[in-house]
Amino acid sequence: MMRSSLAGVASTAATLFPYPFQAISSSQQKSATLPVITVGSLYGNKVDIVMSNDDGWAEMNIRAFYDALNYYNRHISPANSSVVLSAPALNMSGTGSLNGTAELVKDGCQFGSCPASSPGIGFNSSDPHLNYVNAFPVTAMSYGITTLSPKIFGGPPDFAVSGPNVGSNFDIQVPFSGTVGAAVAAINLGIPAISFSGKSGSQISYTDEPVPFYAKAYAELAVWITFTLTRHPIKPYLPEGVWLNVNFPTVDWDTKTCVNYKEFKFILSRIYPAIPFVDAPDVKTCGSDRLPTERSVLERSGCYVSISVGNKSKLDAGEAAQKVVLEKLSDLLSCLP
């Protein structure tokens, strides 16, 4: 099991994740729970990733996640980065699967990250892998996959990630979430995807200091899940037309809420409650053929992460797809008590 195999990975701090990622400096107090890990390609498989969100390209969560993925992939393949960010120039929360054409950024990008009257599509001059699209999350993700990926990777990406969203996305929130919309846009283009959301935090600039604990923690958790799913070179990483909806619980360093990796439990779940006598059984796990709902997982006391399997209609995928995900994430998943 993965949990029991981590002890020998890190030498300078307590082990958190089985990949070479350091989100928090060893000189910081939090390094006691979020460790320094420096290992080589033995622990991973290089994956070309396009990422987006609906909170905006300059929001703290997506930049922390970008840094985390970039750090991980550079350890696997030091010669180049394999992560491209393509996200809205402005906050586009709640725009679902709306699509459109990029327009001039009349008043500038969010948090002053690009000046007024900037072009509808642009990038960070110091890092061309950081791109904005002044349109919807679906538009930004699609641009990343169809335009940026061939230009930077020489072809389509291997995987797509969206978020971590500021705030949860479960149950009736799912159809309206731009974070989810971006993930579904990816699978509609044939790219497996995960939508990540976190309960803690607020929309702040990536330039704010210090970086909040929740942003670092969610970035590490998201990389942990992404790594687990893509660590083997065998494709596809997910069944065709399938995406994962992942929701992280509240984390808070000050109140010591979910600050140690041992506290987190990853639960395979459903997006919506099953309709009795109508919905087919779910994959059998934890002694039941009915998965818990995301809501029931997230409302439970403790550090539970819900992982649901969705389809192109933003509904729960069937038992066959759930079974594939269960097998791929078996080392990570736990049962509710």
Image: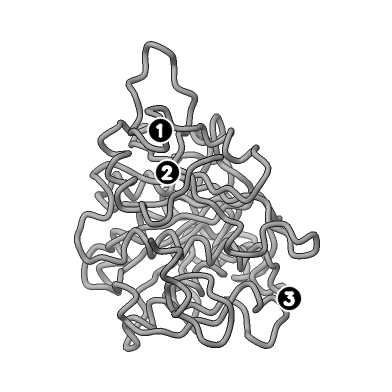
Q: Secondary structure at mark 2?
A: loop
Write the residue at 66% across / 62% down: 214
Write the residue at 65% across / 37% down: 299
Q: Horizontal and vertical percent for residue 73? A: 38, 77
Write the residue at 54% across / 65% down: 219
Residue neighbourhood size for the residue with mark 1, other residues' Cα within 10 Å, grouped as few (<14), some (14–19), many (≥20)? few
Residue neighbourhood size for the residue with mark 3, other residues' Cα within 10 Å, grouped as few (<14), some (14–19), many (≥20)? few
Q: CA distance from mark 1 to mark 3?
A: 46 Å
Query: Which label lies toward us, 2 or 3?
Result: 3
Residue tagged by mark 1? 287
Residue tagged by mark 2? 99
Check the picture and name the quadrant holding the N terminus. Answer: bottom left
Q: Horizontal and vertical percent for residue 273? A: 49, 24
Q: Please name the amino acid that badge 1 sits on.
A: Gly
Query: Which label lies toward us, 1 or 3?
Result: 1
Q: Is residue 307 above or below residue 271?
A: below
Residue tagged by mark 3? 209
Q: CA distance from mark 2 to mark 3?
A: 33 Å
